[in-house]
Image (cartoon, rainbow, N blue to C red):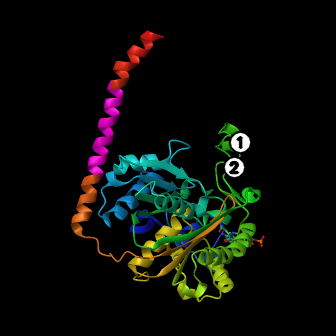
Amino acid sequence: MNSYAHITGWGMAVPERVLTNQELAAMVDTSDEWIVSRTGIRERHIASSAETTASLASLAAFRALDRTDLHPGDLDLVIVATASPEHLFPATACVVQDNIGAVNAGAFDLSAACTGFIFALNMAAQAIRTGSVENALVIGAETLSRLVDWEDRATCILFGDGAGAFVLQARARPGGVLSCTMRSDGSGGNLLEVPAGGSRHPTSLETVHNNLHKIRMNGREVFRFATRVMADATREATHKAGLEIEDIDLVVPHQANQRIIESAARGLRMPMDRFVVNLDRYGNTSSASIPIAVCEAIECGRVNPGDNLVLVGFGAGLTWGALALEWTNPELDVPPARRRRRRLLAQIAAFRSHIRRFLRFLEGLIWGSYTEGEK
Ligand code: UT7
């Protein structure tokens, strides 16, 4: 049995629009100097009205598939980790499944906020290791700009939009995802939340009037929690994989705050050059931050076959976790023919979706009248 889950494809997508600290300083009482010194963030990408969590996720997914020899129809599983889903339901993963034409895949969302990508990657890897699926697509995607209170200077400076995707495939040779630590503490749920819109506080004029559909955060408490758990989770996943911290070539942390990452590095006694940091250009993209950082690290040549990586994250829930993996895929160049194929596949998937909707409409006309008659 092919029982190792290897990452064979990766891709990212961010909106074109860049929002700088200077622009934010014109919107709320803040400054570039404050934001950079307290967070490390200089700019972030913000979705246009035409871009959504699913559209960014689908683009990242196509780019990840381009790197593999897979057709979307070969995928058995699509998981989208997101805190800013397209709808309460259906799942964003189902929208992506339809967009990319993954006609044989089960698709669902995973809600673990900024830790979501790590949990989702682990779920997909476990499904592969048991032999239940062969090919999986795992995506972290967000349009948090839609949930940000643009008048709250404590949060609006932090978040950005984007998506990152990995393709996982079953292989006989050892490597790929090695171990994972998944943790949560619901007692801290109120530290970072969007209070309304669910069953506790359904949407009403009152919830809208009281601004309860926007992100609320106790920044200091989240900061304290993050600095406490990052190093421990990294150490735990490393040891579970049978490795020592010295064996880790690269740590890819959740990109929330430069000071949190530096604190983790100190806790692990690792130099900062073994950490991937790109939050200066993207801000905190929640579940998308880790896959985006991995994609960029690969593009810069910082990830090589045989390298041991730890991905580590924390976020609302509270949730935190770390995942150790051995990077095994050497392919780096995207043949232009594959890019052309992606565009064609997107068109075919959209056409197929329209046909299915039309057939469903016809079935409704035929069977709908039959059911009416039965009543
Ligand atoms: O994915 C997980 C998501 N969340 C996080 O990772 C957040 C973790 N927390 C943080 O990154 C930091 O706590 C923040 C960046 C959010 C805030 O930094 P801080 O150093 O913890 O600042 P603070 O909340 O202790 O606030 C210090 C001061 C306050 O003023 P006073 O009360 O001392 O007069 C704030 O009102 O800074 C003020 N402040 C600002 N000033 C200028 C808060 N936000 C801003 C701002 N610009 N944007």
Compared to residue 257, the image places residue 62 above or below, namely above
What is the spatial separation of the Cα atoms under label 2 and label 1, in whole angstroms?
Answer: 8 Å
Percent position of residue 69, x then y: 29, 63
Q: Is residue 351 magenta?
A: yes
Picture quadrant of residue 145: bottom right
- Which x, y percent locates residue 290? 52, 69
In the image, what residue occupies the spot 67% across and 81% down? 263
Q: Amino acid at mark 2?
A: Pro
Let me know if residue 216 is in the magenta part: no
Q: Is mark 1 within 8 Å of ligand 1?
A: no
Q: Residue tagged by mark 1? A: 200
- Name the element at disc 1: loop
148 or 120: nearer the eye?
Answer: 120
Q: Is mark 2 within 8 Å of ligand 1?
A: no
Q: Position of residue 369 (x, y in %)?
A: 39, 15
Residue 308 image point, x, y percent: 50, 80
Left or right: 77 as drawn, with respect to 42: left
Residue named by callout 2: 195
Neighbour class for label 2 at 10 Å: few (<14), some, many (≥20)?
some
User: Quick one: SS at disc 2?
Assistant: loop
Identify which residue, 303 or 188, lies in the foreground. 303
Query: Closer to the camera: disc 2 or disc 1?
Result: 1
Magenta-colored span: 346-362
- Residue 33 in sight from this viewpoint: no
Q: Amino acid at mark 1?
A: Arg
Q: Residues within 10 Å of mark 1 (few under 14, many from 20)?
A: few
Q: Name the magenta segment's main secondary structure.
A: helix
The furthest residue to the left: 337
* Residue in front for this viewpoint, 124 or 299: 124
